[in-house]
């Protein structure tokens, strides 16, 4: 089971949370490159994900979106929810590292430089209450969704490559036509020069 939320700061963003640590394992495995992962630093918590548009990175997240996601993350931590001034870490899904021997739901990072942190001073009930009203429970096939996403990406890449080849072909033909036109104009200029030279000879004969 996966819980989905709608952010007031950006309703178009997909925000989702695994039900438990076992569900988190599937989210870790079948996340998308567009996903940003949130978790309470140094405390157990739910794994919160935000799905951005293709090509966007963490810099696309507004302060309001980060605050909402961080508040939701704090609220879904048994320990973190009781504490003030806790830190929430967030990083791209692609930066999550799962190695053999890690506990269920536990992750590390490939690159600590890609991990950002935000301090949550206190729980803001108005934000949490509004988010809870949008919660929807679903049972998605995470693997199928990821495979479909990858299939569409490959198709788009193929179409873009074909379009590029067509454009290159068009430009090559255009350059060929321009070269032929230049060659024709050069030939015409040469014929005119020869014709003019012949006319001059005739005039010279008449003069003499």
Image (cartoon, grey):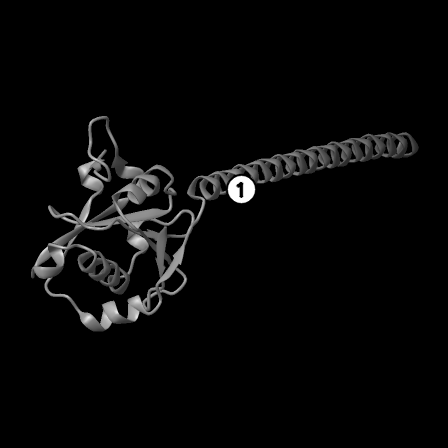
Looking at the image, which residue sits at the far left?
Answer: 84
Q: Is residue 7 above or below residue 87?
A: below
What is the total number of numbered labels drawn onto the structure image?
1
What residue do we see at 86% from left, 31% from top? Answer: 204
User: Is disc 1 surrounded by few (<14), some (14 to 19) or many (20+) residues within 10 Å?
Assistant: few
Quarter of the image for residue 29 reads top left
Q: Is residue 91 left or right of residue 187?
A: left
Quarter of the image for residue 165 reads top right
Q: The C terminus is located in which quarter? A: top right
Q: Nearer the viewer, residue 181 or 68?
A: 68
The x and y percentages for residue 35 are 34, 47
Q: Is residue 89 left or right of residue 32?
A: left
The x and y percentages for residue 122 are 11, 65
Looking at the image, which residue sits at the far right?
Answer: 206
Q: Is residue 36 above or below residue 13?
A: above
What residue do we see at 53% from left, 42% from top? Answer: 152
Q: Nearer the viewer, residue 119 or 148?
A: 148
Q: Nearer the viewer, residue 208 or 146?
A: 146
The residue beneath circle 1 is 152
Q: Is residue 136 above or below residue 39?
A: below
Quarter of the image for residue 174 reads top right
Q: Nearer the viewer, residue 79 or 112?
A: 79
Q: Is residue 156 left or right of residue 61?
A: right
Looking at the image, which residue sits at the far top?
Answer: 100
The x and y percentages for residue 124 are 17, 69
The x and y percentages for residue 1 are 36, 50
Badge 1 element: helix
Q: Is residue 187 left or right of residue 35?
A: right
């Amino acid at each position: 089971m996966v819980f989905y939320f709608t952010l007031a700061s950006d309703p178009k963003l997909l925000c989702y949370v695994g039900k438990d640590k076992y569900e988190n394992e599937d989210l870790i495995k079948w996340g998308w490159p567009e996903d940003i992962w949130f978790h309470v630093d140094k405390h157990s918590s739910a794994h919160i994900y935000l799905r951005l548009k293709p090509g966007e990175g963490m810099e696309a997240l507004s302060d309001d979106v980060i605050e909402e996601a961080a508040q939701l993350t704090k609220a879904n931590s048994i320990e973190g929810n009781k504490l003030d001034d806790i830190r929430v870490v967030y990083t791209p899904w692609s930066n999550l590292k799962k190695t053999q021997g890690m506990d269920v739901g536990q992750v590390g990072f490939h690159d600590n430089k890609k991990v950002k942190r935000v301090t949550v001073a206190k729980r803001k009930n108005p934000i949490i209450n509004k988010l809870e009203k949008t919660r929807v429970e679903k049972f998605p096939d995470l693997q199928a969704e990821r495979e479909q996403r990858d299939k569409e990406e490959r198709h788009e890449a193929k179409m873009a490559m074909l379009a590029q080849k067509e454009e290159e072909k068009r430009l090559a033909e255009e350059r060929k036509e321009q070269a032929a036109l230049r060659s024709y104009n050069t030939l015409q200029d040469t014929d005119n020069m020869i014709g003019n030279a012949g006319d001059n000879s005739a005039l010279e004969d008449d003069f003499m």
